[in-house]
Image (spheres, rainbow, N blue to C red):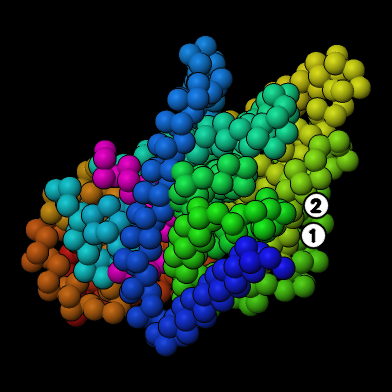
Amino acid sequence: MNKQNLTLGIIQTVTALLIAAAWAASIYFLSTLSNFELRTKLATLTVWTMHAATLSLVIGGVMLIRRAYQNQHPLLKRKNLLGISLVLFGLFLFVSSVVPRTNRIYFDEQIFEGIALSIAHTGKAYMINHGEAEFGALRSFAQEYNKQPAGFPYLAALGFRLFGADEAISHRLNNLCYVCSVLCLGLLAWVLTRSLIVSAYAAGFAAITPMFAIWSNTAATEPAATFFWILTALAGVDFARRQGIAEALFFSGALGLSLFMRPESALILGVLGIILIPQTRTLLRIKSTYLLINLAWLFGMVALAHLFAVRDEPWGSPADRFSLEIFRQNFPINSAFYFNNQSYPLVLSILAIFGLFARQSIRARCLGLVWFLSTWIIFLFFYAGSYEYGADVRFSILTTPALALLAAFGAAQIGKINSTLHYFIIGVCMLSFVSFLPLMRAIGHEAAEARSDVDTMREFAKSLPPRSFILSHVPAMWLVWGKNAAQLNMVQSDPDYVRDTLPERFPGGVYVHWGHWCNVPDYNQNKPCEAAEQIFEMQIYRRYQVDNHDFKILKIVKAKN
């Protein structure tokens, strides 16, 4: 072994040991904190970590764009930029207007927006349980750290800071994530294959995936998570090819933000392994790799700390969150989803199977396969992972990029048999897209009562007098609407405060939001509603009845004797 190889081997060994020691020290430090202490630190640390990741992403991106202009990259020619911009603008119009803008999950979207409001005003990723939001300012008096990672709320908070708190911002954010996902997936396919046909197919197949479009006009986290997986994979491939400082900064920033989008986002490391492991020896010889490792360690440590803090959360499950029995229930449902042509186009599934045996590079096909398995298998074991379990069909969109890539490989391979087959494939896909338009235009039954509650209360909120206060199961949505609010269970935990202090501080009145959770047969959710009736005399301020739900705003008059 010559001196140069010996030195390199020592550097590699020392680097590996230092990284392992850093992770071990981080885990040990986390274990010494109480859960409350850890969550309190994470509320601030998470936001600053995402600031750092965003800064890394932006600096790296600016450097890459500058270099591309200097090198006169073909994509940056005026004609190409105009064509791409028109296509992306058309996609934005489609997803923001043809697909209805609404909420589809039981108040999760309002909670995400509430956390975004907290980040925007306080710099802390908290779900606020008692706050005042009148006059465009937010004051928090009681808060808790949410079990969901704060990636999407962080992005929405950037919009809130620039344009003010508005529900539409979170929806427009996902509209942009949909459009950027299509663009970046096309770029990823191009970088992997150097084929414009594969690139166009991959982008087009992602764009016509029904669930991806449907959920991209909500405030759910999945569209943003999907986009950042694509962006991270694209950045990883680019770094593996060019290995520069700009690529390292861009890659680490994309990876850092991706890790904070969903709890299972760490699974992207398997996809990155397909990209990076074959070039390990080369990468460990360059300085930019060590910059990437250090930044990735920093971002990954905080993401790991979040998972550690919420490891005991029940996630709404009355029993085991993950089990083999759940797998046996979910496997047939989540498998049939891709072949029954009800919510996912059968033609794309068939093309994806062809793509597994296409003549693309083995690395590109493995990347698509590992990506799909990573985002599909994890939910087979999750108690709420069935694609037929209410609004949880949204988890299927995380598989969209992988299947679009594989389908693109398959379509390109079929087209090589005879070029006219491309027209046939495009025609079949367009007919499939048109057949799914009614589904994409439908609001759907998922979370219908919760959606009615939100829509009704949004209108009622406009009529509330100034300096009023709302007690609600979901104070987050009232705070985003600029109203003062707290958890309804305050009537149980501190009835004296509700009786004496709130009316004095809020001459506009103290009100109870009698919404979805007061109507459903759920004892734990009903308790605060029943307590409010038992402790206080209330009169109806506004009321709206739909089906068997009675939505109303009740004004507290006085305490009962």
Q: Pick whichever, 338 or 363, lies toward us.
A: 363
Q: Position of residue 511 (x, y in %)?
A: 24, 59
Which residues are drawn in magenta? 143-163
Q: Quadrant of the N terminus?
A: bottom right
In the image, is residue 161 part of the stretch drawn in magenta?
Answer: yes
Q: Secondary structure at mark 2?
A: helix
Q: Quadrant of the C terminus?
A: bottom left
Q: Pick whichever, 178 or 460, lies toward us.
A: 178
Report the residue marked by disc 1: 331
Q: Secondary structure at mark 1?
A: helix
Q: Position of residue 378 (x, y in %)?
A: 69, 62
Is residue 339 shown left or right of residue 452? right
The residue depicted at 51 percent of the width and 16 percent of the height is 77
In the image, is residue 440 part of the stretch drawn in magenta?
Answer: no
Q: Quadrant of residue 531?
A: bottom left
The residue depicted at 49 percent of the width and 65 percent of the height is 297
**Mark pair 2, 1: CA separation:** 6 Å
Q: Residue 146: in sight, yes or no?
A: yes
Give the vertical position of 99 relative to 312 (above or below).
above
Give the class, few, some or many, for how many residues have Cα within 10 Å of label 1's Cα (few <14, many ≥20). some
Give the class, few, some or many, for how many residues have Cα within 10 Å of label 2's Cα (few <14, many ≥20). few
Report the residue marked by disc 2: 335
- Residue projecting furthest to the front: 2
Q: Residue 551: in sight, yes or no?
A: no
Q: Is mark 2 in CB contact (under 8 Å) with mark 1?
A: yes
Q: Name the amino acid type tagged 2.
A: Ser
Q: Name the amino acid type tagged 1.
A: Phe
